[in-house]
């Protein structure tokens, strides 16, 4: 039986984004719903600002709940931010019948993370014919546009079992 295009999680997210983003408060509502669907991701209060296949922009505010003892945004909050940006960019471009999971993640910290941070991910959506690996990069910048961190996320992509 052929899968409905909306059966793919990324397609459901893309459809939800298309319905909500144009409205006042729509990106905020989408971001809260994403945080509810993926509770750990929701823990950092990420706000999706732009979303299309192969491209995502996600911000997080510097606040006490994401800080470390040095009064900067915690390293793991940065990893979470980079992973959600890469996941959204990758998954909203995946056709029905393809699934993906993170199998590796590395991050290089460039400077202390303070203020509102923006993670940007641009990637080319690969054609998936069998099990494969795909690496995606997300950059995190501060309000001065200084590079704070660069993450490389390795995705295993494969056709979903029928």
Image (cartoon, helix red, strand yellow):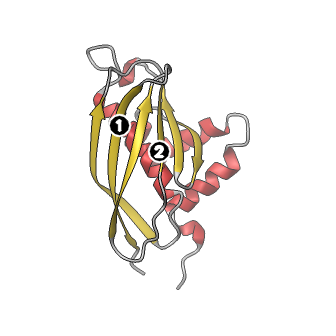
Q: Residues within 10 Å of mark 1 (few under 14, many from 20)?
A: many
Q: Residues within 10 Å of mark 2 (few under 14, many from 20)?
A: many
Q: Nearer the viewer, residue 162 or 73?
A: 73
Residue 146 in the image, given as x and y percentages of width and height: 43, 23
Q: Secondary structure at mark 2?
A: strand
Q: Which mark is residue 121?
A: 2
Q: Within the image, what quadrant is residue 106 found in?
A: top left
Name the side, left or right, on which 85 lies relative to 158. Answer: right
User: Residue at left 41%, top 66%?
Assistant: 99
CA distance for labels 1 and 2: 10 Å
The answer to whether residue 103 is above or below residue 61 is below
Residue 7 in the image, given as x and y percentages of width and height: 54, 68
| Residue farthest to the right, as pictured | 23
Name the side, left or right, on which 9 lies relative to 67. Answer: right
**CB under 8 Å between callouts 1 and 2?**
no
Q: How many marks?
A: 2
Q: Which mark is residue 64?
A: none
User: Residue at left 33%, top 46%?
Assistant: 152
Q: Earlier in the sequence, mark 1 or mark 2?
A: 2
Name the side, left or right, on which 45 lies relative to 155. Answer: right
User: Residue at left 52%, top 54%?
Assistant: 54
Residue 95 in the image, given as x and y percentages of width and height: 53, 68
Q: Secondary structure at mark 1?
A: strand
Quick one: quadrant of the C terminus?
bottom left
User: Residue at left 51%, top 37%?
Assistant: 58
Residue 137 in the image, given as x and y percentages of width and height: 39, 46
Name the side, left or right, on which 61 lies relative to 22. Answer: left
Q: Which mark is residue 150?
A: 1
Q: Within the image, what quadrant is residue 74 found in?
A: top left
Q: Nearer the viewer, residue 69 or 78?
A: 78
């Amino acid at each position: 039986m052929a899968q409905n295009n909306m059966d793919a999680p990324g397609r459901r997210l893309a459809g939800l984004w298309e319905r909500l983003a144009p409205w006042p408060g729509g990106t905020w509502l989408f971001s809260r719903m994403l945080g509810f669907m993926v509770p750990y991701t929701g823990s950092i209060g990420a706000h999706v600002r732009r979303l299309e296949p192969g491209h995502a922009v996600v911000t997080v505010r510097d606040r006490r709940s994401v800080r470390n003892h040095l009064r900067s945004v915690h390293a793991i909050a940065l990893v979470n931010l980079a992973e959600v940006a890469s996941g959204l960019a990758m998954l909203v471009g995946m056709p029905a019948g393809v699934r993906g999971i993170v199998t590796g993640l590395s991050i290089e910290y460039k400077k202390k993370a303070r203020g509102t941070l923006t993670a940007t991910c641009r990637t080319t959506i690969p054609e998936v014919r069998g099990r494969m690996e795909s690496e995606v990069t997300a950059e995190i910048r501060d309000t001065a546009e200084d590079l704070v961190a660069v993450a490389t996320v390795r995705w295993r992509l494969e056709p979903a079992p029928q």
